[in-house]
Image (cartoon, rainbow, N blue to C red):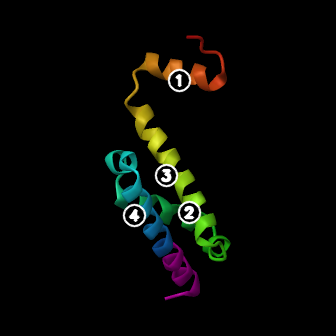
Amino acid sequence: MTQASTEKNTVLKRISEMIDQTMENDSLYQEELDRDELIETFSKLLDRVSPQILLPLNDEQLKERVERVMSTELLSTILDDFTPEEKEMFNAAVEGRWEK
């Protein structure tokens, strides 16, 4: 196994543990996201970004990054369920042009 592969596996193991903790503590993640798909997403990200960037991060720093990716994945699943009208309302709210 190459050093790059070992580093990737080391980071993925830490990320996997953080995914488990986050999903255990927040039922919304459990209900909407698939653990295996998340790990695959992180694996693909680590193919594009060097694991060496993440290796020196402490657990809290890495957890923040993991939760950001998980939140993005969660948001994309929620948006998939929106009707076109709901998507328009969401986009308007994000852009600050939605009025109640």
Q: Residue at x 49, y 78 (%)?
A: 9
**Does residue 52 show up magenta in the picture?**
no
Q: Which of the two labelled residues, at mark 2 and mark 1, occupies the earlier sequence position?
A: 2
Numbered circle sitting on residue 26? none
Relative to residue 72, is residue 22 drawn left or right?
A: left
- CA–CA distance in space, label 2 to label 4: 11 Å
Residue 71's spot in the image, x, y percent? 51, 47
Numbered circle sitting on residue 70? 3
- State which mark lies toward you, 3 or 4: 4
SS label for mark 2: helix
Is residue 3 shown above or below 51? below
Question: Quarter of the image holding residue 98?
Answer: top right
**Does residue 2 show up magenta in the picture?**
yes
Q: Residue at x 45, y 16 (%)?
A: 85
Q: Residue at x 59, y 58 (%)?
A: 64
Instruction: Look at mark 1 in the image and give the residue it sits on.
Output: 90
Residue type indicated by callout 2: Lys
- CA–CA distance in space, label 1 to label 3: 20 Å
Check disc 1: other Cα within 10 Å, few if <14, some if 14-19, many if 20+: some
The magenta span reads 1-11
Residue 95's spot in the image, x, y percent? 65, 23
Instruction: Look at mark 4 in the image and give the residue it sits on.
Output: 20
Residue 28's spot in the image, x, y percent? 38, 45
Residue type indicated by callout 1: Phe
SS label for mark 3: helix
Check disc 2: other Cα within 10 Å, few if <14, some if 14-19, many if 20+: some
